[in-house]
Image (cartoon, rainbow, N blue to C red):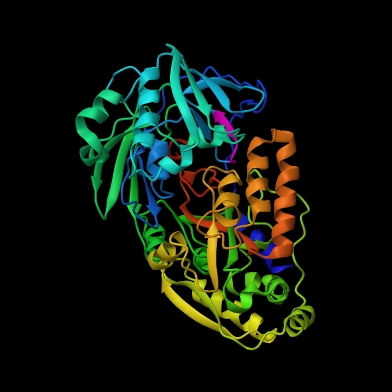
Amino acid sequence: MSMKTQRRGRLVGLGAALAVGTVLLAGCMGNAGSTSSSGGSGAATTDNGSATLAMPTEPANIDPIMMRSLSAWNMYYAVFDGLTRIDAKGKIQPGLATDWKSNATQDVWTFTIRKGVKFQDGSELKVSDIVYTYDKILASDKSTNRVAIAMISKVEATDDHTVQFTLKNPFSAWLNQVATIGIVPEKVYEAEGPEKFPNAPVGTGPYSFVAWDHGVDYKVTRNDAYWGDKAKIKDITFSFVGAPDARVTGVESGSLDTAIIPASQVPVFDGAANAKVIEAASNQVAFIGVNTTAGALSNLKVRQAIPLAIDRKSIVDSLLNGFASPTGEPVAKGVTGYVDGFPTPKYDPAAAKKLVEESGYDGAEITLQYPSTGGSPTDPEVAQAIAADLGKAGLKIKLVGAEQASLSLSLANHQITGLYLNYWSPSSMDGDVVVSQLLAGGPEDYARSPEMAQAYLDQQAANTDKRTDVFKKIWEWNATNVSNVPLWQNTNAYATASTISWTPAVDGIYRAAEIGRSAK
């Protein structure tokens, strides 16, 4: 029996069964596609007390106009709604829009807005609020959400219940993008502005804002006037707990109800009576990024040696406790763009060494930057293992550790000096953003290939049934040219109170309204 199988058996013994109760609604993309839903039943729910959900990081801002942040989405999905929503499995479902359609070229999208929706202050949602939200984002040069919707040419209300987007170019993943934009009430936002609104936000979501104690926690309470299915737990606290050990002890002691934990800490909960560990698929892929213009890395054979030199399985088994699956593509299973059966490079140190020798490599030092703090606790060990593997192939690697925020700044500013260890987990659950950032002109693209620039536009314009073919060509180009080296798809481990039932989402973001609690 493999380590992975043994570990899974232990988790089942801990009662790590996932409560799956989500009703999937049909939705269509592409030419004249549409979907519809009548929304939640609005049935009364019992109190079910409260729950405290641990978050590894606190967002700098929680304003859907100004901030696009992985950590902030935990609160966005509680307080705000988008036109569509991404469910726990990563699939598109109706949100404020009951149905939608696109034209044949997918550059005009029309959404029918749900009737009778109210903001948490009691005011009625209007199509003008939706137009305002998007226009406000586009008008702000400080909004980190702006880049996500920069392809909008025009957004307009075509009648009292319809909003239409005209895009600058075809974009088949538009349904995923609008899911991440929370709608705000124009009147309130204009009165409060970006300075005050985050500390007293108003949305249409399943929870209403209560308080934000900066550096400590963020509290919400159930919105009993919500248009959809009511939240299962009345009061939710998002607690900011950066230290992995503190998250583990928090669940052990009962001060936290659920927390993502390092794989190395899973055994702590063996035999625990008041807690369990839930293993959940993740949309995060670890990879080695490559500055293809830097010194020896400008040599194709040197780059082609790297994926063959890394023993993915050994690192996953020994350092990640089996909580990952080796991969050869930059997006995870479940994300649009994932290609079933795409090959993972085989560990072949002899072939890697031969390529290095054939390249004429002169022994020049190659830097490998990695998060020494602020990232995954295993990042330093993983970086050391990768450096050792590359060393066996004949490459001279210099490890350069930095705090995660500092490394992220270097990435954003296109300042990587060689190789770097990084992760991508697209919250839109679409590979478009990954291609853009890594291979088609984004800050982590050093090759600047005209072929990839065109391929990026091709996948945006392709209908749903054709996009996989385009993504396959993109991943094949990357496998040959090695602009980045996909390593493995991570698996998340959540320590959870035994009374909590939920299905962790593949994007790692809490859907607080779907978390339930049984009687103690």
Could you say where residue 129 lies in the image, as x and y percent from the top left? Answer: 35, 23
Please identify the quadrant where the N terminus is shown: bottom right
As drawn, 395 above or below 106:
below
User: Relative to the observer, which residue lies in front, 80 or 102?
Assistant: 102
Could you say where residue 513 lies in the image, as x and y percent from the top left? Answer: 44, 35
Write the start and end of the magenta stretch as one range: 89-93
Magenta stretch containing residue 90, yes or no? yes
Magenta stretch containing residue 108, yes or no? no
User: Relative to the observer, which residue lies in front, 14 or 445?
Assistant: 445
- Residue 263 visible within the image: no
Residue 184, image quadrant: top left
As drawn, 268 above or below 64:
below
Could you say where residue 457 lies in the image, as x and y percent from the top left? Answer: 63, 42
Please identify the quadrant where the C terminus is shown: top left
Could you say where residue 45 lies in the image, as x and y percent from the top left? Answer: 41, 26
User: Relative to the observer, which residue lies in front, 223 or 93?
Assistant: 93
Q: Residue at x 64, y 25 (%)?
A: 26
As drawn, 6 above or below 128:
below
Residue 22, image quadrant: top right
- Residue 119 visible within the image: yes
Residue 187, image quadrant: top left
